[in-house]
Image: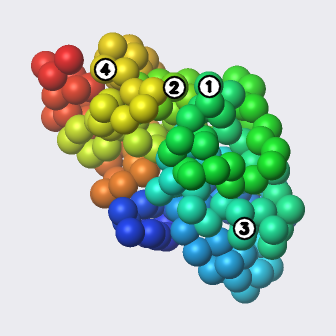
Amino acid sequence: MQIDRLVLGELATNCYIVTGTENRAVVIDPAAKGEQLALFLRERKLTLDAIFLTHAHFDHMGGLRALVQETGAPVYLHAADEAIIAQMTHGRMTDTYTPYGESVSAAGVMFRVLHTPGHSPGSVCLLAEDTLFTGDTLFAGTCGRTDLPGGSWEEMQRSMALLSALPGSFDVLPGHGETSTLQSEREFNPYLRGNGV
């Protein structure tokens, strides 16, 4: 599994392109510049199997419409976030979403889907091999804000407990900012450690 990170959009959102087997790929959070993402895939001769959204906020899906038009790839979104799409993106970004199951296989990679509400009702983290894509749930040193529509501090507390309890350590690739590891966050992040919740 190869991971490329592109920082896109006005809010410097991390978009991840995960390349698996047989030149197939997944895009996580196409934040902006969908045409540029499609060009990235074409230049590397990659077929896009799926687009994964960690949640339905505009800064994580600004490039979605163009990327879907260019590739026809299915878009995965937790069903609990469908209700906030119109409010958070000024209208639907695509006509059809596929709800996540407990896991999704794409590009020859198995992604375990962890429902981690708090930042939004349908926020998810995606666990693939030794990597945890955390969207706006967990950042290096902090957690996502809970004051936007559908946010909940109580649910964020439960989501932090869920992530902290995962066995082992993983590379943490958040929706904004620098990468980290789950073990480092357990030791130094007050929200994951419990001191801030």
As drawn, is 161 to the left or to the right of 37?
left
Residue under label 4 = 153
Q: Earlier in the sequence, mark 1 or mark 4?
A: 1
- Asked if marks 1 and 2 touch (Cβ < 8 Å), the reply is yes
Instruction: Provide the secondary structure element on which disc 4 rests.
Output: helix
As drawn, is 108 to the left or to the right of 59?
right
> Does 21 sit above or below residue 35?
above
Q: Quadrant of the N terminus?
A: bottom right
Amino acid tagged 3: Leu
Q: Residue at x 31, y 57 (%)?
A: 177
Q: Residue furthest bottom?
A: 43
Q: Residue at x 36, y 55 (%)?
A: 176
Q: Is residue 16 visible?
A: no
Q: Residue furthest left?
A: 195
Q: Nearer the viewer, residue 69 or 135?
A: 69
Q: Earlier in the sequence, mark 3 or mark 1?
A: 3
Residue under label 3 = 67
Give percent across and percent down for residue 121: 51, 25
Give the distance between the C-alpha atoms of the residues marked 3 and 2, in whole angstroms. 25 Å
Amino acid tagged 1: Ala
Instruction: Provide the secondary structure element on which disc 1 rests.
Output: helix
Residue under label 1 = 80
Give the distance between the C-alpha atoms of the residues marked 1 and 4, in whole angstroms. 16 Å
Amino acid tagged 2: Pro
As drawn, is 147 to the left or to the right of 131?
left
Give the distance between the C-alpha atoms of the residues marked 1 and 2, in whole angstroms. 5 Å
Residue under label 2 = 121
